[in-house]
Image (tube, rainbow, N blue to C red):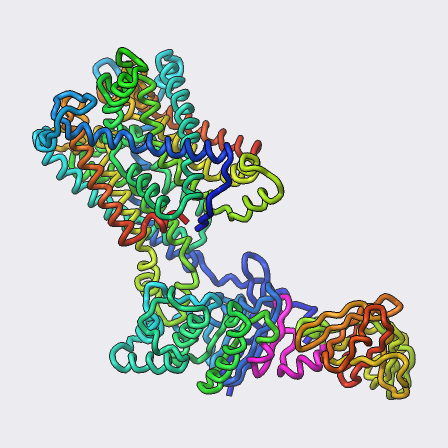
């Protein structure tokens, strides 16, 4: 990594620094201001805050179907991330370690779900599920989310595999390991950052998704983003602010932990 | 008894032929160096022996048995990679034990074996360290121990000393040679560094463009190479054109630049033939023109062009009147400053025994 | 041994397709099967659906027709929404780039602890729920929100500015959403530039601006391309953001398509709209890549 001493002070560098810091403030501002609102006792969103209160946090429990929808979102996200990461390991191995005709096309195809409009995916899937008669089930929702997130672990694992020293696998083979043992004892441990970050991204993206879920759910089957969205549309109080703040704190903790333990961030920026 | 035999190995990669009928026979316990410039196919040969490349034709035999169809993990060869390829997530001891583990040898006996080999490379005190906390020299020794602990039939080393600094390299050269002789394992070293090859190997095979050009003991190859490219690659050389100016039944006279003339055994030289003559810089010595040239030692005459002081030697560049440049390596103590002032006339005496003649 | 006559033999291809690709085939087949069934087939179905008609009672006809596409391409409303979506996306990309590149440059220059903190902020932004982030802008841009309160407090305005439910709010939120995915590719490609290049330029007499324009920027174009394409694609297909922060007069194309499906239950028409959007985005991205390649001789 290139670290440098202080760059020369001139107008260009000055302008760059100022813009950068302003942009970072721009990035953080909504989150921080939302947090302020969440502790504000007044009913409407207003500044400056009047009095400190926790009540909107307690009110989260009153959001319609919040418990059930969160449960569904959690289970879908977890299973989708798990299954997709497993499928992704196999696919990434195939792409990174074998040369076959049409490899580039295949890779582009496997990564394409990211660039598809989510509404398109949602529409395509609900029509398809209606056609085969499994619409509005937990499994169809799972499948929809798997299509949504599969590209993320593939991307992170491909990056990990290409960064890995190829001699390591050859060394293990020369020492007597079968292809599977070489994968299990040498390759897989090397892939930990890619695996963890792929799983995390898949989980978070699935958990948060609205456009695909909204087409695939009905009645008792609902997801947390949908219920939050409905609440925002129908209510003016700052309960969503409390929810948002809680959400950001939890996500921050998860990511900070993953970075600490598995160094996913410093590993993926190479 | 043969340790390893290569029989007409030809390899194509990506539609290009990389190895052309490479053949070699290595005795058990012998250490052979594959020496050549980058791209000559030496690493390809090594990887073919190890089983990572499948040759289009030819055979690889270990102790008489062909291993062509065998996967790399079934060949019982110890491979030391150029970048050592130590498993970063395992400790030194776990790295060394890996091969034993793959052979289902675990438990106190294998632990003892691991310790024994770590002691052999003087690293028994770092068994619990991770590779990232080792120096380059230490990593190399761990890689060696890891390859040797499995008692391989063949030891394959890819540029083993390339990444080490001068002092460490000299030290490791000795240690490596001792280890190899002590264990008696058939060894192949791939290198582009001729000093490494000459100092480590019992025999050196020089490769260019996918084929072995010459194979022989380091001394034979260095003093009496049969190809000018081999001479040029193995060390400094002065190569210049000469003409056969006189022949009789036994001898031929060669004449060349700077007034060079010598009489050698004729061999198959013919009158007026153009040949290439080679002599190494260290086989040229200095004498100044106004000394008696009574002896028949072949001499070149010219002017001192440039001198380079290199500590143990002095390199002198001499230009003959017909614009030929020669390089001589002499001990700084054998000459005086006055002799080698730029522009001084100077004579070079060639050691007759080391003059090599190559047909054009 | 005369090495000057190499023997050329025909390579014996004993290596079959299976022995070479068999492993890859086995590894890829589960995923390929999954995607074939749940990705390719649904989309193929979507496309064929877009070639159908719905009669007034909701029944889909059996014959294939271009009717929906003609309807899409000739509808002035669709054209307006398309054009609006396009201009908002371009605006988003430009503003995001102008804000993200300096962040990436800053990250290259500062020490590792502040850099890690910034990286964490960016990753957390990336991982935060879209609804959460958009709601944050509701907090900021509402009539009684933070920005209005601030502007009124410093006396810049008397009455609160109407910012919510407008194109402005959508673009601001889209920019906010896109900054992380623009910063990371640019940062990645800046990291790959050896510092010696900048130093060489400075020692040869170039100032910081020239060094940036002639050395740093051109070499970072692959990262810029990656970031801008992603931002553009995401903005063109934006759904949640305009839904939360926009109004019917600022609707974007995904909303129109979704409306046809969820409200009007006109599946063929909605499908045609969404297919048109996808194809259009794809063409624009390919066009953009070609320009970058030809004009800037970039390695994209």
Pick whichever, C228 or B215, lies toward us. Answer: C228
Pick whichever, B313 or B351, lies toward us. Answer: B313
Image point (63%, 74%), residue name: B206
State left or right for residue C162 relative to residue A16: left
Measured along the vertical axis of the image, is residue B192 above or below residue C101? below
Coordinates of residue B338 in the picture (x, y in percent): 81, 75
Measured along the vertical axis of the image, is residue A126 above or below residue C273? below
Pick whichever, B88 or C70, lies toward us. Answer: B88
- Tell me where residue C236 sits by quadrant: top left
Coordinates of residue B37 in the picture (x, y in percent): 62, 67
Measured along the vertical axis of the image, is residue A55 above or below residue B126? above
Image point (41%, 78%), residue name: B148
**Magenta span:** B197-226
Confirm whether the magenta stretch covers residue B181.
no
Coordinates of residue B6 in the picture (x, y in percent): 54, 76
Pick whichever, C50 or C128, lies toward us. Answer: C128
Coordinates of residue B175 in the picture (x, y in percent): 48, 81
Labels in figure, total: 0
Measured along the vertical axis of the image, is residue C205 above or below residue A35? below
Q: Is residue B71 visible?
A: no
Image point (41%, 70%), residue name: A174
Q: Is residue C11 visible?
A: yes
Image point (30%, 62%), residue name: A184
State left or right for residue C36 relative to residue A174: left
- Tell me where residue A176 sits by quadrant: bottom left
State left or right for residue B160 relative to residue C148: right
């Amino acid at each position: 990594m290139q670290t440098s001493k202080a760059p020369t002070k001139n107008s260009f560098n000055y302008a760059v620094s100022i813009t950068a810091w302003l942009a970072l403030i721009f990035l953080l501002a909504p989150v921080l201001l939302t947090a302020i609102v969440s502790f504000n006792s007044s009913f409407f969103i207003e500044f400056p805050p009047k009095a400190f209160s926790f009540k909107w946090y307690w009110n989260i429990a009153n959001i319609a179907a919040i418990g059930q929808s969160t449960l569904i979102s959690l289970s879908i996200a977890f299973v989708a991330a798990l299954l997709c990461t497993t499928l992704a390991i196999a696919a990434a191995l195939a792409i990174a370690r074998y040369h076959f005709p049409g490899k580039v096309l295949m890779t582009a195809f496997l990564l394409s779900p990211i660039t598809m409009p989510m509404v398109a995916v949602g529409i395509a899937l609900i029509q398809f599920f209606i056609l085969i008669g499994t619409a509005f089930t937990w499994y169809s929702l799972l499948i929809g989310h798997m299509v949504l997130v599969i590209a993320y672990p593939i991307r992170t694992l491909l990056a990990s595999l290409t960064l890995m020293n190829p001699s390591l696998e050859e060394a293990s083979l020369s020492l007597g390991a079968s292809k599977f043992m070489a994968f299990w004892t040498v390759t897989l441990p090397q892939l930990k950052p890619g695996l963890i970050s792929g799983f995390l991204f898949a989980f978070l993206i699935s958990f948060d998704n609205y456009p695909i879920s909204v087409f695939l759910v009905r009645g008792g089957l609902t997801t947390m983003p949908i219920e939050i969205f409905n609440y925002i549309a129908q209510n003016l109080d700052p309960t969503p602010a409390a929810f948002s703040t809680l959400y950001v704190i939890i996500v921050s903790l998860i990511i900070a932990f993953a970075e600490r333990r598995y160094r996913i961030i410093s590993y993926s920026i190479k | 008894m043969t340790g390893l035999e290569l029989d007409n190995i030809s390899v194509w990669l990506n539609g290009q032929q990389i190895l052309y009928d490479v053949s070699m026979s290595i005795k058990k316990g012998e250490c052979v160096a594959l020496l050549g410039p980058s791209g000559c196919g030496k690493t390809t040969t090594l990887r073919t022996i190890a089983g990572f490349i499948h040759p289009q034709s030819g055979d690889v035999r270990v102790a008489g048995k062909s291993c062509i169809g065998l996967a790399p993990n079934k060949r019982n060869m110890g491979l030391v990679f150029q970048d050592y390829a130590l498993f970063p997530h395992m400790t030194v001891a776990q790295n060394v034990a890996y091969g034993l583990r793959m052979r289902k040898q675990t438990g106190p006996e294998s632990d003892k074996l691991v310790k024994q080999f770590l002691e052999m490379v003087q690293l028994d005190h770092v068994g619990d360290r991770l590779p990232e906390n080792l120096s380059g020299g230490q990593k190399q020794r761990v890689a060696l121990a890891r390859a040797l602990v499995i008692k391989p039939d063949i030891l394959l080393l890819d540029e083993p000393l390339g990444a080490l600094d001068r002092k460490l390299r000299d030290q490791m050269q000795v240690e490596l040679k001792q280890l190899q002789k002590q264990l008696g394992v058939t060894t192949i070293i791939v290198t582009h560094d001729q000093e490494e090859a000459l100092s480590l190997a019992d025999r050196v095979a020089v490769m260019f463009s996918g084929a072995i050009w010459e194979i022989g003991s380091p001394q034979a190859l260095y003093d009496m190479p049969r190809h000018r490219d081999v001479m040029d690659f193995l060390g400094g050389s002065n190569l210049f054109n000469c003409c056969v100016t006189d022949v009789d039944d036994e001898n031929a006279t060669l004449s060349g630049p700077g007034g060079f003339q010598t009489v050698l055994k004729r061999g198959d030289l013919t009158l007026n033939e153009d040949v290439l003559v080679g002599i190494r810089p260290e086989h040229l010595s200095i004498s100044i023109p106004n000394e008696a040239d009574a002896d028949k030692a072949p001499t070149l005459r010219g002017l001192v062009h440039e001198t380079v002081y290199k500590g143990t030697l002095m390199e002198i560049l001499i230009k003959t009147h017909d614009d030929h440049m020669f390089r001589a390596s002499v001990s700084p103590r054998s000459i005086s400053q006055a002799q080698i002032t730029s522009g001084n006339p100077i004579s070079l005496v060639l050691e007759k025994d080391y003059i090599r003649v190559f047909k054009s | 041994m005369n090495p000057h006559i190499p023997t050329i033999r025909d390579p014996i291809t004993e290596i079959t397709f299976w022995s070479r690709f068999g492993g890859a085939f086995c590894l890829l087949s589960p995923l390929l099967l999954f995607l074939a069934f749940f990705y390719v087939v649904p989309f193929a179905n979507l496309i064929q659906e877009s070639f159908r008609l719905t009669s007034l009672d909701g029944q889909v006809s059996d014959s294939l027709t271009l009717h929906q596409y003609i309807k899409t391409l000739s509808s002035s409303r669709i054209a307006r929404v398309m054009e609006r979506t396009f201009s908002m996306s371009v605006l988003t990309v430009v503003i995001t780039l102008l804000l993200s590149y300096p962040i990436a440059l800053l990250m290259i220059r500062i020490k590792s602890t502040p850099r890690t903190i910034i990286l964490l902020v960016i990753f957390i932004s990336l991982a935060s729920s879209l609804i959460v982030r958009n709601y944050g802008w509701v907090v900021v841009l509402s009539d009684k929100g933070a920005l209005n309160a601030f502007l009124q407090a410093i006396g810049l305005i008397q009455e609160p500015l109407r910012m919510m439910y407008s194109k402005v709010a959508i673009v601001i939120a889209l920019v906010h959403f896109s900054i992380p995915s623009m910063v990371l590719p640019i940062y990645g490609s800046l990291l790959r530039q050896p510092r010696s290049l900048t130093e060489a330029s400075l020692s040869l007499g170039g100032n910081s601006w020239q060094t940036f324009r002639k050395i740093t920027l051109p070499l970072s174009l692959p990262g810029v391309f990656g970031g801008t394409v992603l931002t553009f694609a995401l903005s063109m297909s934006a759904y949640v953001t305009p839904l939360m922060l926009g109004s019917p007069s600022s609707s974007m194309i995904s909303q129109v398509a979704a409306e046809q499906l969820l409200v009007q239950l006109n599946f063929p028409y909605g499908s045609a709209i969404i297919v048109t959007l996808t194809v259009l985005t794809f063409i624009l991205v390919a066009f953009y890549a070609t320009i970058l390649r030809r004009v800037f001789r970039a390695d994209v």
